[in-house]
Image: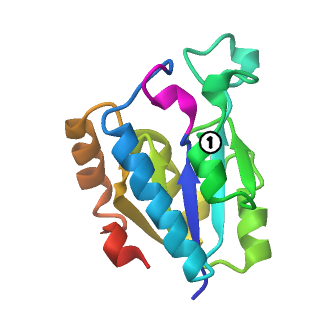
């Protein structure tokens, strides 16, 4: 099987001093850096996914195009400098993006999903209709959201649809 690591929405607005800081963001960032390093050692492609608010719907509370908050965190860009970046406007990373084409080009049939926010973009991508053809696992300790409780509820809810793995089990 050919895996890919999807790194979803590790963007500045989710960190301290951003527009919408999340619980456990710094620890999650460190864990995702480790996941990227492990992926690279095993020659697993890393795909960065960046949410940009749809400006036709008005000003968003965060991820507005051209803002520092919408930028992918510099540590992720340093960890994966050659990773393709998929721009999305919806929680599901497959909707109106080139993610599917990127995965096909790489010959991927297994997805390891991580990122921010667990209950939104992470789970919506993992359970996407377009993801059904892939073997999907969420790296649960490489995700976060607004609170720990919401993170755990989201993981429990999606656990009947796919495998949840730890960083140690993922690679």
User: What residue is rendered at 74% in x and 18% in y?
Assistant: 55
User: What residue is rendered at 45% in x and 63% in y?
Assistant: 34
**Pointer 1 local density, CA inside 10 Å: few below 14, some 14–19, many at least 20:** few
Which residues are the magenta region? 11-17
Q: Which residue is mark 1?
A: 74
Question: What percent of the width, then of the height, locates residue 20?
Answer: 45, 22
Question: What percent of the width, then of the height, locates residue 89?
Answer: 67, 35
Q: How many marks?
A: 1
| Residue 22 sits above or below residue 30 on the image | above
Is-magenta flag for residue 127? no
- Identify the element where label 1 is drawn: helix
User: What residue is rendered at 65% in x and 42% in y?
Assistant: 50
Q: Nearer the viewer, residue 37 or 117?
A: 37
Question: What percent of the width, then of the height, locates residue 133?
Answer: 58, 73
Q: Nearer the viewer, residue 36 or 49?
A: 36
Residue 127 makes an appearance in the image: no
Give the side of residue 81 with respect to residue 62, left or right.
Answer: right
The quadrant of the rendering that contains the C terminus is bottom left
| Residue 28 sits above or below residue 35 on the image | above
Q: Quadrant of residue 105?
A: bottom right
User: What residue is rendered at 49% in x and 74% in y?
Assistant: 38
| Residue 113 sits above or below residue 75 on the image | below
């Amino acid at each position: 099987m050919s895996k890919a690591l999807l790194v979803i929405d590790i963007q500045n607005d989710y960190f301290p001093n951003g527009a919408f800081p999340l619980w456990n963001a710094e620890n999650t960032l460190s864990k995702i850096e480790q996941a990227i390093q492990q992926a690279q050692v095993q020659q697993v492609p890393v795909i960065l996914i960046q949410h940009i608010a749809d400006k036709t719907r008005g000003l968003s509370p965060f991820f507005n195009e051209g803002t520092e908050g919408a930028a992918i965190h510099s540590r992720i860009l340093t960890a994966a400098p050659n990773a393709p970046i998929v721009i999305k406007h919806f929680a599901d990373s497959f909707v109106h993006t080139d993610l599917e084409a990127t995965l096909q080009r790489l010959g991927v049939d297994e997805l390891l999903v991580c990122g921010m926010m667990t209950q939104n973009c992470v789970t919506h991508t993992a359970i996407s209709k377009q993801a059904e053809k892939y073997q999907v696992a969420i790296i649960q300790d490489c995700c976060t959201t607004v609170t720990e409780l919401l993170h755990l509820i989201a993981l429990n809810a999606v656990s009947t649809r796919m495998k949840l793995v730890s960083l140690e089990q993922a690679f």
